[in-house]
């Protein structure tokens, strides 16, 4: 039986209008990391996975939708899941369907919808970057707090009609990354504090090997919007397109995670 958070996040996921859900998702591997479910299971804050083992932070406060694995050439599901290191990649709703279909790509590649991938505004690019820094890579993190940072997973505002509550919603992918395929580096965001379990100089993983990164789940996080920013039920009109109820939250201070 699903908990309230699973039901809530499922309603938000429906608004993403992802085509081919039966082909892309694997419901037996759905998993809830809400406080209630984590406390009931007695989950730890972090775990070690892979060969050799590597620490990752459990995505508490998120809900995972299992994804059908797109296996790299010559690798089995057991090899990916038993040997791979767990990491995360924050994203935007407009990229979710493309990433689910073709996997994570690097700037300069073409997405599933035919559009070219470019560095996000405010991120390092060819014109603005530290000397020697290569932006044409896939960046992930063993810390969901880092991958879910506003710089990588900007929140959007969503009104849930069943609870009559406005939520701040974030999206990220849970991954398995082949050991030895990536470099470990320091954070590239300015916040002084990110994660108590992962050192700052180990927060960012980067790789050019696209086959080394396997998506295992789509993560959704939802938190009630601060009251002064939440729109009342009367002000939100019911329209045919559910996207009309999703607004960017540029003027909202996102709660720290």
Image: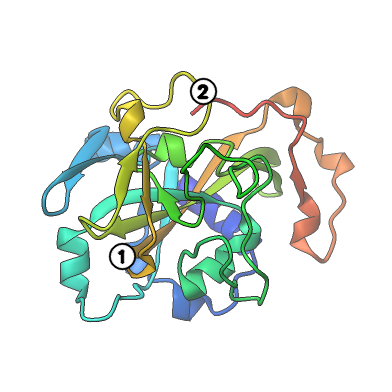
**Disc 2 designates what residue?**
191
Q: Relative to 196, is 247 above or below?
A: below
**Nearer the observer, 38 or 21:** 21
Q: Give the image quarter of residue 43.
A: top left
Q: Alpha-carbon distance for marks 2 and 1?
A: 29 Å
In this view of the protein, can residue 43 be seen by the observer?
Answer: no
**Nearer the observer, 109 or 149:** 109
The spot of residue 159 in percent (x, y) is: 72, 45
Q: Residue furthest front?
A: 131
The spot of residue 6 in percent (x, y) is: 46, 51
* Label 2: which secondary element: loop
The spot of residue 13 in percent (x, y) is: 57, 59
In this view of the protein, can residue 81 be seen by the observer?
Answer: yes
Q: Residue furthest top?
A: 192
Name which residue lies at 47% across and 18% down: 192
The spot of residue 129 in percent (x, y) is: 57, 40
Q: Give the image quarter of residue 69.
A: bottom left
**Nearer the observer, 181 or 60:** 181
* Residue 212 - label: 1
């Amino acid at each position: 039986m699903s908990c309230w958070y699973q039901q809530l996040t499922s309603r938000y996921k429906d608004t993403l209008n992802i085509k081919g859900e039966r082909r892309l998702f694997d419901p037996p591997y759905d998993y809830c990391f809400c406080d209630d479910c984590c406390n009931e299971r007695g989950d730890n804050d972090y775990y070690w996975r892979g060969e050799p083992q590597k620490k990752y932070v459990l995505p508490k406060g998120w809900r995972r939708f299992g994804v059908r694995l797109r296996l790299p050439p010559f690798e089995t599901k057991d090899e990916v899941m038993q040997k791979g290191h767990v990491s995360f990649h924050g994203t935007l709703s407009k990229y979710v369907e493309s990433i689910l279909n073709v996997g994570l790509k690097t700037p300069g590649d073409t997405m599933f919808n035919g559009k070219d991938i470019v560095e996000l505004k405010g991120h390092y690019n060819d014109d603005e970057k530290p000397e020697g820094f290569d932006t044409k890579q896939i960046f992930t993190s063993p810390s969901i707090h880092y991958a879910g940072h506003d710089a990588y997973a900007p929140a959007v505002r969503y009104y849930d009609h069943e609870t009559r509550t406005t939520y701040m919603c974030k999206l990220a992918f849970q991954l398995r990354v082949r050991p030895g395929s990536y470099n470990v580096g320091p954070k590239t965001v300015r916040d002084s504090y990110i994660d108590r379990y992962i050192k700052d100089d180990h927060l960012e993983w980067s790789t050019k090997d696209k086959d080394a990164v396997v998506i295992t789940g789509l993560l959704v996080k939802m938190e009630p919007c601060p009251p002064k920013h939440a729109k009342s039920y009367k002000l939100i009109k019911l329209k045919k397109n559910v996207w009309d109820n999703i607004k960017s939250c540029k003027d909202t201070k996102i709660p720290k995670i």
